[in-house]
Image (cartoon, rainbow, N blue to C red):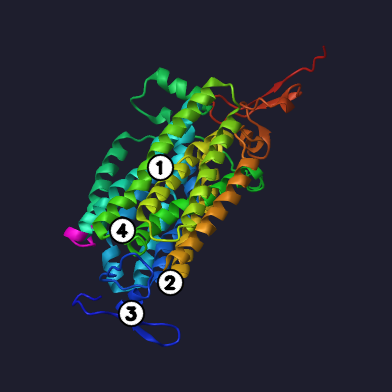
Amino acid sequence: MDATGKEMTSSDIGGKTETKSDRDSEKGSCCLNDQGELDWSESLKGVLLGAYFYGYIITQVVGGVLEQKFGGKVVYGTAMLVATVLNALSPVASRTSPWAMFAVRFSIGLVSGVLLPSLYGIWGRWAPTAERTKLLAICYIGFPLGNIINYPLASFLAAELGWEYIFYIPGAFVAAWLLAWLLLAYDSPAKHPRILEEEQKCIEDNTGMREQQKPTVPWLKILTSPAVWALVIGQFSSNWGVYFLTTQLPNYMQNVLGFNIRTNGLLSALPFVLAMVSMMASSVAADRLIQGGKIPTVWIRRGIVITGFTGTVICGVILANLRECNPVAAVALLCITEGFNGMTVAGFRAVHVEFAPRFAGVTFALANMGGTVAGIFAPLLVGLVTDNDPTLAGWSTVFYIGAAIQGVGGIFTVVFMRTDVQSWALEKGDGEPNIDDQSPELAGSKDLIIANEFAEVPTKVVEMTNTKL
């Protein structure tokens, strides 16, 4: 429907012209709703929703490298500023053409791709071993918390002020956040001007990093490591569910469950409430179990991964088998699904700062590239399936595919995931052993090269005599 209230038309591939009301009448939904000002097909909306991820996937590794070179404070803050400005251009771009909107969303994804890799690089220097899961979870709850706030807020703004304000109002909150970030954030404990000496020493002793490090990245060893690929596959599988909810949940709520825009906003936020609770609860539990020392860390992580993925698969299969419109059951299952998915933070997302603390930003960038592939294909798949079959049967196909992806991905992650520091993360450059390397291979070595890049003394070669007992 255009600005004058006239119904817009579109033609299918065969040249047949049909009105929007004709298309709506064919839908097997509980309730029929108006499209609004921008009458875009489901497949086109899928492409536009995926545009963000086309840009996002490109700069993942770039983000990890930039963080190591310039520090996370500059990289993260600059990316947030540019993304906010681009987001404010979305209403103008969408009214210009769908492809102008595509360009804006692609650009937002491009600058946003550096955010999480730089964040992991920061936590690699700030998070002590016993608190890593909990501290990462505190950051990660920003995702569901943002959705909890944004869905109802967006519904209110669209109903009261117009949909354009969905893009304008949040920008003011980001501006306030940027000010706090500039004043309070620092790349490492050593660069914090107000930190206590005892606190700095405690953090550095528990992370093994005394300065912002700039080691040579062993790309070949990282790319051929099964432990890294376990996190890549795990991120892809988990993010399939996350990106389905963040991009398609309002669509499902409106066109299948039949909720109006206000109710849609409130109910779309519910799954993320449970996700936030499960993130914190599982993360606190994981840290306590790790501190207890009775169960190996890798099995604590694996147990949480098994629980999380098993729950999401079961809920997905049940959703796929809902044969009639049951909004209460559907919303409850979506909430439980996201609750199980929230456990992945404590399950495998915290592993980056455990198995490769020096390269946490880089390994997370690779894993997030895998996760971003899910963001590209999830909306495309939903758009393709629901454009041709916008009924419960069509959505059933979507849920079955999601359950299969999460089941297979969960198994691969559990089998190959590791939490002990990998050999390539202990080495410097071309294979020189790091001073922190306590591996058995160095015991009895004749020559020990002290190559601690964080020490303030020159590199020395110390002769060690062989002794036999």
Whether pointer 4 and pointer 3 mark residues with C-beta atoms closer than 8 Å, the reply is no
The type of residue carrying mark 3 is Asp
**Residue at image x 47%, y 48%?**
63
Helix, strand or loop at disc 2?
Answer: helix
Reading the image, the residue beneath label 1 is 275
Residue 162 part of the magenta segment = yes
Q: CA distance from mark 4 to mark 3?
A: 33 Å
Helix, strand or loop at disc 4?
Answer: helix
* Of marks 2 and 3, the one in the foreground: 3
Reading the image, the residue beneath label 3 is 22
Residue 48 part of the magenta segment = no
For disc 1, the neighbor class at 10 Å (few under 14, some 14 to 19, many from 20) is: many
Q: CA distance from mark 1 to mark 3?
A: 38 Å
Residue 348 seen in this snapshot: no
What range is drawn magenta here? 159-165
Q: Nearer the viewer, residue 277 or 113?
A: 277
Residue 79 seen in this snapshot: yes
**Residue at image x 56%, y 38%?**
215
Residue sitting at the far bottom? 15
Reading the image, the residue beneath label 4 is 87
Helix, strand or loop at disc 1?
Answer: helix
Q: CA distance from mark 2 to mark 3?
A: 14 Å
Reading the image, the residue beneath label 2 is 387
Q: Quadrant of the N terminus?
A: bottom left
The type of residue carrying mark 1 is Ala
Whether pointer 1 and pointer 3 mark residues with C-beta atoms closer than 8 Å, the reply is no
* Of marks 2 and 4, the one in the foreground: 2
Report whether 371 appears left or right of 277.
Answer: right
- Residue 304 shows which numbered tag? none
**Residue at image x 35%, y 52%?**
328
Q: Nearer the viewer, residue 64 or 96?
A: 96
